[in-house]
Amino acid sequence: MALYRLEDFDPDYQDTFEGNDVKGLGVYTEGTNEKIGMVSDVLVDEEGHFRYLVVDLGFWIFGKKVLLPVGRSRIDYNSDRIYAVGLTREQAEDLPEFDERNTLDYDYEERVRGVYRNPSYQTSGLGTSPIIDTPAGLGTSSVVDTPTPLDATLDTSYRTTNTPIYDRDTYNYDREPSLFGLNEQNHQTLRLYEERLIANKQRIKTGEVAIGKHVETETARVAVPIERERVVIERVTPADAGKAVAPGEADFREGEVARVELHEETPDIRKEAVLREEVRVKKVVEHDTVEAQETIRREELDVNAPGLPVEER
């Protein structure tokens, strides 16, 4: 499995961890509180799981960096320290050197893992520490550490028939929880859950308005002024009544008829359609706020540590 530097895998990792950056923390032995080095980087796998802490031993071995599996570490944010579980300063010195310029392949990882798998690793150094005698008068014997070279053959004498054999094609970090699993005693995580209300909206049909038209009939009345002719016979006595007329002026004959035509007006009623009004139909949206309530659950932390100091951060 490929490994990546934490910053290359997630450039914003500090936001993800809410400012709790392990880079720069000092690494100390768990029993003697002796400083081993400082975390210079973190290596993660393809899924972002922490696999190794890159420990810089430069303050006492110039420029040397080694890998510390996360399963062999314990982070104490209260003191800004990382404790190496079962690791002494001398053992750290004997670890294979990590070179960032070289490719981190399976063979190199196996050399590192092979060191940590050795049961004697937890109590004694990994390299040899020969005693060199000095000439008389210059002091007693001194110890000279000889780090294990990268290409050196690791001690596999501790292996038995029950010791697992790992293969590059099938290897998985989860198979070695002692190296890559977070120690349950030192890295316990208790998740507290709570429910929350999720407000959504859905559009439903609440009704339908049908708008049409129909015809109503009524009787309309209209007043039309008309003219009608009639005959008025008026008899008057002329002013020269009784005066004699000239002979032949009077023409007495029968059958003379005066004809007078009479006319009258009749109403001519017809209908025509006219536009009375327009009816415009549209929809408007009214906004309203509807409140809803529901019972939700939330988990709270119960701490039972009578007489023991507990600090919540």
Image (spheres, rainbow, N blue to C red):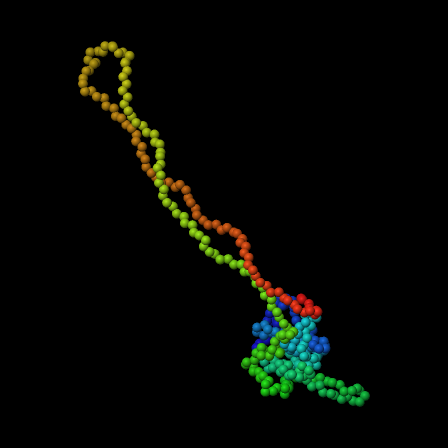
Residue beneath the point at 59% across and 80% down: 106
Residue 140 in the figure: left or right of residue 119: right
**Residue 108 in view here:** no
Q: Is 34 positioned to the left or the right of 161 in the image?
A: right
Query: Is residue 263 something one can see in this rendering?
Result: yes
x then y, percent, for residue 20: 65, 68
Q: In the image, what residue occupies the spot 50% across and 57% down?
A: 201
In-front residue for pair 78/96 = 78
Please tell me which residue is depicted at 75% across the width and 85% down the height of the picture: 142
Residue 111 at x, y percent in the picture? 62, 82
Q: Residue furthest right?
A: 137
Q: Does 111 appear above or below 296?
A: below
Q: Is residue 208 above or below residue 59?
A: above
- The front one of 256 and 25 is 25
In this rendered view, identify the residue nearer to me: 80 or 296: 296
Q: In the displayed structure, does residue 252 sit left or right of residue 201?
A: left
On-image quarter of the N terminus: bottom right
Q: Residue at x 30, y 27 (%)?
A: 228
* Location of residue 91 by image quarter: bottom right
Examine the image and state in which quarter residue 295 appears.
bottom right
Q: Quadrant of the C terminus?
A: bottom right
Viewer-closest of 187 and 136: 187
Q: Quadrant of the rendered structure where residue 8 is? A: bottom right
* Image location of residue 266, percent across then percent down: 30, 31
Instruction: Estimate the x, y position of residue 167 in percent, counting from the top left.
Output: 56, 82
Q: Going by the picture, which residue comes out furthest to the left?
A: 254
